[in-house]
Image: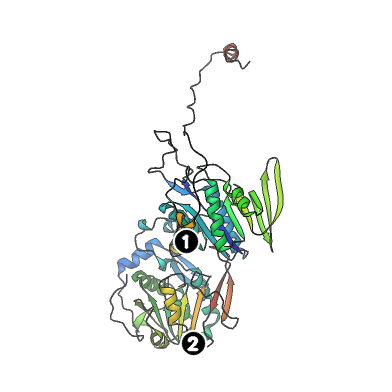
Amino acid sequence: MKVFVAVKRTLDYAVKVRVKADKSAVDLANVKMSMNPFCEIACEEAVRLKEKKVAKEVIAVTVGPKAAQETLRTALAMGADRGIHVVTDMRHDTELQPLAVAKVLQALGAKESPDMYILGKQSIDGDNNQTGQMLAGLMDAPIAAFASEVSVDGDKVHVTREIDGGLQKIDLGLPAVVTADLRLNEPRYATLPNIMKAKKKKIEEIKAEDLGLSLEPHVQYTSVEDPPVRQAGIKVESVDEVISKLKETGVL
Amino acid sequence: MQTTTPATSGAATSSNLVVTAEERALVREHTAKTDVHGVRLRLITADCPLYHETDESALPFEAPWWAFCWPGGLALTRFVLENPELFKGKRVLDVGSGCGSVSLACALVGAREIVANDVDRLAGVALAENAELNGLKMDGESAEGEPKLSFLQENRIGAGKAYFDAFDVVVVGDMLYDADFSPTLLQDLAHHRGVYFGDPGRTYCPQEVSEDNLLASYDHHEDGFSAIRVFRLTAA
């Protein structure tokens, strides 16, 4: 089977986020960018399907600026066979929204006919958790979101999902959409030999406007705020003082 | 990387580069001794710091293709050692010799003459190091009756049918990954009757290989691959 894996360039998970002075968005200037951690898990799962001979070809897809090519290279270094880069200058944490990405994936899928679409459950910038669901909706295809285990048996995909209060096991027909949760696998690290070979793999560049889709955002960001700064605590001398302070604040 | 060299015919019997002590020290510094199907090699292994370097610009040399035994070369090395009769007494060209594992395997099974060919000078240095590890002599140092092993630093891809036909056997380990040279190489060797490819399924590797031309398939569930195949393009 052919597998599409969607990967997104986001702020590195370890970076301390700063809000821009005009509060329009998070400041992305001179900040380390990486592959979204849930996309790494999705990519790892796709590569493992190939190593198990289930997948014949793994195609990594990204939508984003020129620099998002680095993210595709990371996917290729992990073991994806080739990449498709839909180039847009839209800000990928605010302007480029899940519905637009889902439409792009649907359009590319119509050309390539993959049997499975594996995505991260959400990106750590927009935190929307919508792209996979919207893609399945647009395609009228089955979806298993929050996957913690995936196996393929002929034309059926067995997925264990992480849901409130436990695990749910479901079977899907193909083509299917699967979104990766945190415990699906532990992604491999790229190594020098893999990076060297990845440089030789093919990346097809497509301008977003050439797809003939409307990628206009439907949600408007009005203001981005830092979390409130934590107020300093106070020291008390006795139990009685604790009780009186708690009474003052209305807790007791 | 390609340099002008005096050796232009297929009749090269001695290496066209002189390996310096500094270069050998450089290769030794960044590699570790390891064993690939019984061939001893100095490679950048997972124990070497450079294996985990993800920024190519931080390397002390150009991309070290010679410092890894790629899956295609790994399979071909094993195939040579398991099928010595195909290589014994033959005149062999190793295109893209890299670390030299396939050339050395050919020497170990008694090929008459082996020309290891690579564009990277350090591949020649690595070959010299690795030959020594396996007790093999290079160039004119080998005694009468011993395999003659030499290194040719030159791009011969695109040299055409006649050049390759001068060799009994041509071995190609993991060279079908490049948009520019891989299709040319396949063209050069399309009709050669003694060519052996080792490949895990790179982009330019022929998708379909007939049962007759598929010579071996080894499990290799790594790097996004599941098997490495050894195949030829035309029946011998």
- Residue that appears at 46% across and 62% down: A204
- Residue that appears at 47% across and 86% down: B191
Left or right, B215 with respect to B116, comes to: right
* Placement of B211 over or under A243, stated as above or below: below
* Placement of B74 over or under A199, stated as above or below: below
State how far apart marks 2 and 1 are (Cα): 32 Å
Badge number at residue A194: 1
Badge number at residue B6: none
* One can see residue A186 in this view: no
Residue tagged 2: B193
Residue B11 in percent (x, y) is at 35, 86
Dot 1 lies on which element? Answer: helix
Left or right, B18 with respect to A237, comes to: left
Crowd rating for badge 1 (residues with CA inside 10 Å; few <14, some 14–19, many 20+): some
Crowd rating for badge 2 (residues with CA inside 10 Å; few <14, some 14–19, many 20+): some
- Residue that appears at 49% across and 31% down: A227
- Pointer 2 and pointer 1 on the same chain: no
Residue A66 in percent (x, y) is at 41, 53
Image quarter (top left, top right, bottom left or bottom right) of the C terminus of chain A = top right
Image quarter (top left, top right, bottom left or bottom right) of the N terminus of chain A = bottom right
* Placement of A45 over or under A90, stated as above or below: below
Type of amino acid under label 1: Asn
